[in-house]
Image (cartoon, rainbow, N blue to C red):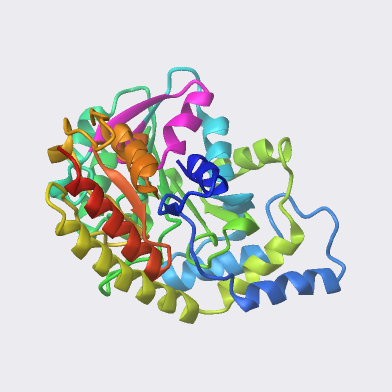
Amino acid sequence: MAKRARELVAEGKPVISLALGQPDFASPPEALAGAVAEVEAGRTGYPPLAGQKALLEAVADKFRQENGLQVPLSRLMVANGGKQLIFNAFMATLNEGDEVIVPAPYWVSYPLIAGMFGGKPVIVPSREEDGFRPDPQKIRQAITPRTRWLVLNFPNNPTGAILERADLEALAEVLREAPHVMVMCDEIYEHLVFDGQQALSLLQVAPDLAERVLIVNGVSKAYAMTGWRVGFACGPEPLISAMLKVQGNATSGICTLAQGGAAAALRSGSAGIKKMCATYQRRRDQVVARLRQIPGLTCALPQGAFYAYPGLAALMGKTTPAGRKLQNDEDFAEALLEEAWLATVPGSAFGLGPHLRLSFAASDEDLQEGCERLANFVASLS
């Protein structure tokens, strides 16, 4: 959808894009200064495979101060963004036919990467009326002797759902019954939470699972550093060692300048994050209120990240002014782009439709105009 939106913009069409999950803030000045310091110190050679000590120490401090977790450096590594960490973990552990449980809606790469290594994605749908939180009983029923991983991504992309302590405790009980299952906790949106809530890590609730939990995180979202490509992971030493072997034969260590910037960002404090969260919460409130005013749409309140995930079920089967019959959310998203010049992402891409994902990491003006275009488009359906 983003690609098609760019093509239409190149043709002179007045497209507004709410399709990309990218902060619309600048990277913090501390990160820029940290990268410059690497240049000035001459640290431009091959970096250590697991990461520069200064960055690993900053990551360890982050886990201690923010999550109450004491993590030795031997349980840490950095990579070219969170996606490489997921790739490394699945490549290091999956054999043909191993199962990976992925609650839906999910970020699109989890099942795709698992499938690259012969893994079998097992999708467990959640419900809008449950706030898109996975049902522990359904997770329990999905586990088989071939289950290798359970993937948890909260705060969630695309729904903005978070897991509360009771949710994590219930999932931990399920996992204790299945000691062969590892857990990938993608916490990249950890700091982007609203209404005074806190995004808890599974290890804060169930430290006894530490030898089976891989935490994936990074600086992309909370620090608006998507292009720096710095992700970090915390996990059992045997798993981290295997992931490093994968990385050592793929990309080796990551850019020293980016590592210096990431270390400086992690040590800079949370003032910039708090400002960003306040802006996202204000935008969330405005966007969700407007979406809920549109007849035929439903919209759960996102508790984190920067996405709204409105439901379209009542609009399926309708026809657009151009004569296009809307059979599914892909039809809806394509028609919305082609006829109303608004780019979104269909929920079926995330494993649960009919929905749309709208990013509110966009200017107030674009969000207001985008919502009006969506409202007018819905009103034009017959």
Whether 110 is among the magenta residues is: yes
Residue 179 in sight here: no
Up/down of 267 relative to 223, above or below: below
Up/down of 322 relative to 188, above or below: above
Q: Give residue 83's quadrant in the image.
A: top right
Q: Residue 173's spot in the image, x, y percent?
A: 23, 45
Q: Give residue 257's quadrant in the image.
A: bottom right
Q: Residue 62's spot in the image, x, y percent?
A: 51, 69
Towards the viewer: 91 or 76:
91
Give the residue at x 49% y 57%. Answer: 22
**The N terminus - image quarter:** top left
Give the residue at x 68% y 37%. Answer: 245
Q: Is residue 217 left or right of residue 32?
A: left
Give the residue at x 33% y 33%. Answer: 330
Towards the viewer: 84 or 280:
280
> In the current view of this chain or complex, which residue is farthest to the top?
96
Q: How many marks?
A: 0
Q: Is residue 116 left or right of residue 34?
A: left
Up/down of 307 relative to 175, above or below: below
Towards the viewer: 219 or 364:
364
Q: Residue 199's spot in the image, x, y percent?
A: 33, 63
**The C terminus - image quarter:** top left
Q: Residue 268's spot in the image, x, y percent?
A: 57, 79
Residue 339 in sight here: yes
Up/down of 329 relative to 44, above or below: above
Q: Is residue 225 left or right of residue 195?
A: right
What's the magenta region? 101-125
Q: Give residue 360's quadrant in the image.
A: bottom left
Whether 145 is among the magenta residues is: no
